[in-house]
């Protein structure tokens, strides 16, 4: 049984070349049909579609794609989103409350060995406080209530 791989293969090269040539031929036929005068088709046994449809079909397709991409798809996606006032929108299970690290230090209360070389190197700089999530009430008060 042959294993499928994305590596280049001779058959893929042939298929790709045939598709490339076929698409070029289709584009050439499309432009000839769009730009051909109607007088050339008077002696034909059948009448080709009007050139109007050569413009309208791509415009309809682009309009449908635009409506789907910017209206329908976001509306479908919003059905599965949480409500805006739901707490799961602003926090998750990995969030740390503001006093989380202080409580951890107080809970341990075990003295650590200090590395004298390292502490001397960093004694001049101010320590960086650990990252934690801001309380939503404080943020709302600063943004909306103190103005």
Image: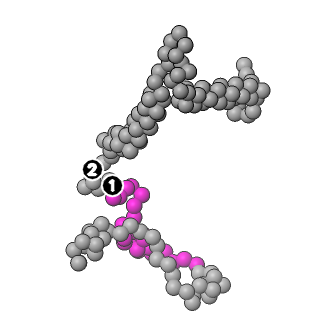
Between residue 52 and residue 40, name the one nearer to us: 40
Look at mark 2 in the image and give the residue it sits on: 83
The percent position of residue 76, horizontal first and vertical second, equals: 34, 39
Q: Quadrant of the N terminus?
A: top right
Circle 2 — which element? loop
Between residue 12 and residue 31, name the one nearer to us: 31
Residue 89's label in the rendered image is 1
Q: Is residue 49 above or below residue 116?
A: above
The answer to whether residue 98 is magenta is yes
Q: Magenta part of the protein: which range?
A: 90-113
Choose the circle earlier in sequence order: 2 or 1.
Answer: 2
Between residue 93 and residue 62, name the one nearer to us: 62
Q: Residue furthest right?
A: 10
Specify whether 122 is left or right of 75.
right
Q: Is residue 112 above or below residue 4?
A: below
Specify whether 99 is left or right of 15.
left
Residue occupying image coordinates x 33% and y 54%: 89
Between residue 136 and residue 80, name the one nearer to us: 80
The percent position of residue 143, horizontal first and vertical second, equals: 28, 72
Specify whether 57 is left or right of 134.
right
The percent position of residue 50, horizontal first and vertical second, equals: 46, 24
Q: Is residue 99 above or below residue 114?
A: above
Circle 1 — which element? helix
Residue 87: quadrant of the picture: bottom left
> Marks 2 and 1: CB-CB under 8 Å?
yes
Q: Quadrant of the C terminus?
A: bottom left
Q: Is residue 145 visible?
A: yes
Q: Is residue 57 visible?
A: no
Density class for disc 1 (Cα within 10 Å; few <14, some 14-19, many ≥20) is: few
Residue 55's label in the rendered image is none
Specify whether 81 is left or right of 119.
left
The percent position of residue 18, horizontal first and vertical second, equals: 70, 25
């Amino acid at each position: 049984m042959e294993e499928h791989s994305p590596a280049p293969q001779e058959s893929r090269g042939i298929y790709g070349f045939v598709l490339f040539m076929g698409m070029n031929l289709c584009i050439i036929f499309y432009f000839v049909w769009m730009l051909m005068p109607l007088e050339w088709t008077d002696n034909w046994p059948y009448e080709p579609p009007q050139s109007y449809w050569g413009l309208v079909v791509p415009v309809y397709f682009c309009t449908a794609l635009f409506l789907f991409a910017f209206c329908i798809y976001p509306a479908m996606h919003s059905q599965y989103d949480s409500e805006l006032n739901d707490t799961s929108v602003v926090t998750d299970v990995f969030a740390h409350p503001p006093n989380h690290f202080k409580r951890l230090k107080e809970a341990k209360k075990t003295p650590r060995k200090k590395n004298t070389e390292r502490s001397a190197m960093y004694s001049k700089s101010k320590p960086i406080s650990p990252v934690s999530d801001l309380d939503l009430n404080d943020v709302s008060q600063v943004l909306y209530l103190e103005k």
